[in-house]
Image: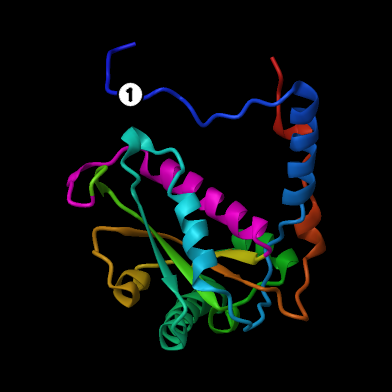
Amino acid sequence: MKEHASIALSDFHEYPAEEMIERSKAFYQDIKRRHSIRSFSDRSVPREIIENCIRAAGTAPSGANHQPWHFVAISSAEIKKQVREKAEHEERAFYDDRKAGETWLNALEPLGTDANKPYLESAPWLIAIFAQRRGGVSVDDHQKNYYVPESVGIATGFLINALHSCGLGTLTHTPNPMKFLNEVCGRDPAERAFLLLVTGYPGDDATVPEHALIKKSLGDICTFM
C-alpha cells in the first residue's frame, strides 16, 4: 500500500462471535420495523435530534472522502408550504397528466399514492438532500467529486437508519423534476436535488400498504460463493 498520512485504528470494537450473531439478529428485528409512511403528526421534534442524525449521515463513506452531499433541514411552516405547492404541481403532471406512463403508474397503484402530499406540511421536518458534483474535503474546494450518486445514496441510508433508531418515521419523496428545491432552499444550481426525506412521528391514522410488506427472501437477494 502506498504510504500516506494515517493514525492507528483505535475506536473499533470487536465482539465475541456469539454476541455478533445476537447483535445482527437484534439489528434485523429492529430495522424491519422501519416503514415508509404517508401520514405524519405535527408533533414537534427537537432540532438536536435532527442535527445528530445528520451528523451520523455525514460519517458515511464517499468517493475520495469528498463527502459530496448537503442536507437542508426544513422546519419553517412557510417553506414547507412552498415545498408542498411546488411538489404537488410536479406530481399533478406525473399522475393526472400521465407523464409517468402507464407501466410506472401501475407499479405504484398498490401503494395508494397520488398527487396530494399533505405530509409535506404536517410533518415537523423535511430534509432536502443535495448531491454536489464538485467539492472536496474542505467546503472551499472545487475539485471533481467521484461516485457522487453512490456516496449520497449511502449517506441517505445512514440518515434513514439514524432517524428510525431515534423512534421517528420517514418517507423518501422524489418529485420529478426536483429543481424547485434548489430555489426554495437557496442552493447552487450546480447541485442536484437527490431526495426529499420527510420525518416525524407517525400520524394516528398512519398505515402501511400490504404491498410494502412483501420482501424478497435471503435466497432471492443474496448468493454465497
Q: Is residue 155 magenta?
A: yes
The answer to which image quadrant residue 121 occupies is: bottom right
Vertical placement of residue 60 versus 103, above or below: above
Count of residue discs: 1
Hey, what amino acid is under mark 1?
A: Ser
Classify the position of the C terminus by image quarter: top right
Give the residue displayed 25% in from the left and 43% down from the top.
Answer: 136
- Pick the residue in front: 114 or 57: 57
* Residue 114 pos. (x, y %): 63, 76
Give the residue displayed 74% in from the left and 29% down from the top.
Answer: 20
Range of the magenta residues?
Answer: 139-167
Q: Is residue 111 left or right of residue 133?
A: right
Look at mark 1 in the image and give the residue it sits on. Answer: 6
Q: Is residue 114 visible?
A: yes
Q: Name the residue furthest top.
A: 1
* Residue 27 pos. (x, y %): 73, 43
Q: Is residue 141 magenta?
A: yes
Q: Is residue 16 left or right of residue 125?
A: right
Give the residue displayed 80% in from the left and 34% down from the top.
Answer: 22
- How dense is the environment of label 1, judged by Cα within 10 Å: few (below 14), some, or many (20 and up)? few
- Pick the residue in front: 194 or 59: 59
Give the colouring mode of the picture.
rainbow
